[in-house]
Image (tube, grey):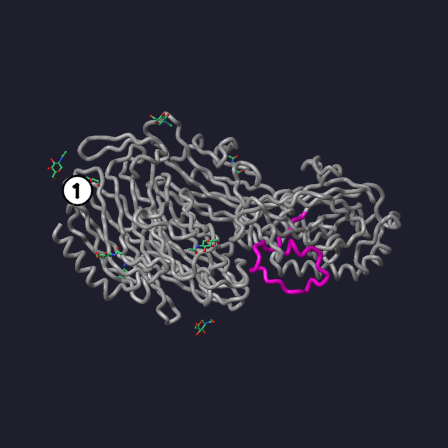
Amino acid sequence: MEAGAVLLLLSALLGISSTLSFYGDSVSFNPPQKQKDGTFKVALYHRQNGRSSCAHQSSFSCQDGVCSSFDKSGVLQTDQDDTGQGRWCQSEGRTTVTVRTNNTSFSLRDSGCCWVSNVRGRTNRTTEAELNLGTRSDSRAINSCPVTSAVSSLRVPQNCFSRIRLLALDPDGDKVRCRFASDAAAPANFTLDETSCTLSSTGQIQAGVQVLELTLEDFPSKNITLTYADGTSEFREASDMNAPPLCKVKLQFSMEVLPPIPNCEAGHVQPMFLVRTPSHGDILHATVGQTFQLYAQAQAHHASIHDFQVSGPQNMTKEVKDDRSGTAEVTLSWTPRRTDLYRFVPVCFTAETNATQSEMRCVVVMVTQASITQGKATVQCSPNKMMVALDKASMPGIDENFLELRDPSCTLTSNRTHIMGSISFSTCGTKLEDKGDYIVFKNEINSFELPNEIVIRRKTVKIDFSCQFPKTISISSYYNLHKSDYIFTESSFGSFGYTFEIFRDENFTNKVEASAYPVEVKLLQTIFMGIQANSELPNVTLFVESCKATPDDNPENSRSYDLIENGCLKDETVIVHPSDQNEFNFEVQAFKFTGNYDQVYITCAVILCEPGNPFSRCAEGCLKEPSRRRRRGLSKETSTHYITQGPLQFIGPAGPNAAKDERDAAMKESESLAAGTSPSDSPDTKSKGDRWEIQELLNSNITTVVFASGFLVSLVLLAVVVRHYSRKRKAEDRNALIVSDFEN
Ligand SMILES: *[C@@H]1O[C@H](CO)[C@@H](O)[C@H](O)[C@H]1NC(C)=O
Ligand SMILES: *[C@@H]1O[C@H](CO)[C@@H](O)[C@H](O)[C@H]1NC(C)=O
Ligand SMILES: *[C@@H]1O[C@H](CO)[C@@H](O)[C@H](O)[C@H]1NC(C)=O
Ligand SMILES: *[C@@H]1O[C@H](CO)[C@@H](O)[C@H](O)[C@H]1NC(C)=O
Ligand SMILES: *[C@@H]1O[C@H](CO)[C@@H](O)[C@H](O)[C@H]1NC(C)=O
Ligand SMILES: *[C@@H]1O[C@H](CO)[C@@H](O)[C@H](O)[C@H]1NC(C)=O
Ligand SMILES: *[C@@H]1O[C@H](CO)[C@@H](O)[C@H](O)[C@H]1NC(C)=O
Ligand SMILES: *[C@@H]1O[C@H](CO)[C@@H](O)[C@H](O)[C@H]1NC(C)=O
């Protein structure tokens, strides 16, 4: 105890001179291991953030001197500001503690002074953790603490702050509760979602440095019994948040709230992560002795990304590449050692520009033995579903009867050699994720237990798989015909979606069901279409900036016809019907493109605004001078999203005979084209050809090696990247179209 006090005093003295700018810290634990002599050994990793120096030896102590032999390995600086201004750095130090107690839990504490000067005038800091020492009945091991971390220096313009998703992952699958630390009140206008560990604002946050001190606690999500060293045991009911937590750790970080900027859109001046970047909360895998790599890519159109800030383990190396076109990438490499085995290592990163920063993303790297099992699996992505096939031979010990998809009502099938699943994008619990430049559909195969099973001898499995599609092409192509739900996420608006439907009459209630697509229409028939916005925010105004028709589902087709442009009605048959502020209902008389095109797709550009804001795009309405540059940052509104519906299929005679009935919707050159085409030409060759090619590309198999280990058999199928429709190809297609027009 005395030694602890001396250490504390020493560190306080040292601290005054060297840690005048504490930026926060986090601690992660390996679960305590019981030794033969009855003591427990706990390895802890302390990450400390600071201004120009942060590699201080941490000096934890336990209450009542139950801890002995603090075995500290060197503290290493793991990341630092590369601008030469020494604005931030992070270090990690490993300490192994021997705990001698017959108590059910023990706690550790490290305190000091000198938070970075901040708006609330916080000075003293305390780092604490409390760990339960009981053996869990479910895992037959001592509890693992929630895993968390943060980069050294978070920066956000005052008007752009909407939320920060913090890492709060529990290796045992427990429920994690995040709270503001009891000795530190919530900073003004901040609120914390206790379940998702998301920090958001309830009003304007004060500019300057904000310091945040949070506590993460885990509670079992199943009924468990804890058995202690002295032979006593304790029952813990599932999700009983009134019971003491199994583990309590602290996460402290600082956030610099910068002056407002004109545009908060991700990808404008604030970098946006691109698709190859892992998602927040992903679990990645590393193997002892093998180099693990994490790749992230970010883009900002109006700023240059010069660095990535990283919170990672000791000796993780960082290689940043900037391609000078607004996109930068980072490769993090790390080779786990024996002592890292079974560690859950948090890794967080942000993309840095001079003026601001991207969102922070955090993942957890799970370190396992040299892979015991090499699993083989194949994912096939097709326009509206994904098919996964697991090679049984590569995964011995996996019982297919105890595997399920995210939605257990969807079944897996199997033959002698494979376990197969065919999963639609809209069912089976498939999740849609907007990854900036790509849309990703994700599902997973998990093993499950029978409710009354006491001992599980099967291996547990989790197999993540996904299909991803570039956003440059309208999503509707993947739904072959009808697609009504579009989902987007934007930092200042959260998640929101649109439905785009064709209705049977002017009441806009009786929609044409998906199975009836393509919708058959006759020329000059009235078509009723409705767009509805659904948002997490209670009151939003929907604005339809433009709607145009194209003969295929490529909204960038040069053959197009405007119905609405810049908020103004362009076609005289368009009539807008009155509706709620989150809806837009309109009618238009059916038309078709001259030439052998008997299909029409409608693509609309839509925006959501905060209601009642006179400066929003929604309030401006029809703009005769579209070139006027708008400063979106001044009002809360989303960026423009494109939604497509169709096709409308024309029935009845097509081709030159019907030409006199057609409203001329095409471009000039198509008139001569129509005159020269013979009715025997197969209609819509071009668009069919396109679709076929897409399908062919999507159907190409990509085999991914998955791995598993005896500790927690876990299979990861990396996303199947299908890059079939880059901008370049699109341009080529368009050229081909123009050429063929001339040839005709
Ligand atoms: C726990 O340990 C303390 C001192 O180490 C001892 O006095 C006490 O009897 C022990 N209690 C039990 C229940 O073993
Ligand atoms: C046991 O732990 C509790 C809670 O941490 C603490 O209040 C108590 O003093 C401890 N008892 C001993 C003997 O260490
Ligand atoms: C900070 O800690 C010092 C010494 O531990 C104490 O004297 C002081 O009152 C503390 N300050 C605050 C604001 O808690
Ligand atoms: C909290 O937000 C409200 C509304 O935006 C604002 O009036 C108030 O000044 C903010 N409080 C602080 C301490 O910044
Ligand atoms: C958990 O325990 C509670 C209280 O004993 C009981 O009511 C509940 O049914 C149990 N739940 C499960 C899933 O066993
Ligand atoms: C990190 O690298 C240094 C120098 O190569 C080495 O001495 C140290 O042991 C390494 N630490 C870890 C945790 O890998
Ligand atoms: C970033 O800002 C610093 C000073 O604030 C300046 O010297 C440097 O040139 C800037 N870098 C870029 C890439 O704009
Ligand atoms: C089982 O199904 C997979 C995937 O469809 C197939 O590749 C394999 O040949 C089938 N095996 C047998 C024995 O039919």
Whole-percent x, y for residue 42 in the image:
23, 47
Q: Is mark 1 within 8 Å of ligand 1?
A: no
At x 26% / y 31%, what residue is drawn? Answer: 234
Say if the magenta span includes residue 609: no
Residue 333 in view of the camera? no
* Foreground of the two, 431 or 353: 353
Q: Of the residues shown, which amino acid type is indicated by label 1? A: Thr
Using residue 76 as the reference point, say whether residue 354 is left or right of it. Answer: right
Residue sticking out furthest to the top: 452
Task: Give the main secondary structure, helix, strand or loop, of the magenta stretch.
Answer: loop
Indicate the secondary structure of the residue bearing disc 1.
loop
Figure check: 84 above or below 223: below
Residue 138 picture quarter: top left
At x 51% / y 31%, what residue is drawn? Answer: 409
Using residue 616 as the reference point, say whether residue 682 is left or right of it. Answer: right
At x 84% / y 51%, what residue is drawn? Answer: 663
At x 20% / y 45%, what residue is drawn? Answer: 41
Q: Residues within 10 Å of mark 1 (few under 14, many from 20)?
A: some
Say if the magenta span includes residue 631: yes
Classify the position of the C terminus by image quarter. bottom right
Whole-percent x, y for residue 606 in the image:
64, 51
The residue pinned by badge 1 equals 39
Whole-percent x, y for residue 313 in the image:
32, 56
Q: Which residues are magenta?
A: 617-644
Residue 274 in view of the camera? yes
Whole-percent x, y for residue 99 in the image:
18, 45
Using residue 468 as the reference point, say whether residue 105 is left or right of it. Answer: left
Using residue 364 as the reference point, say whether residue 123 is left or right of it. Answer: left
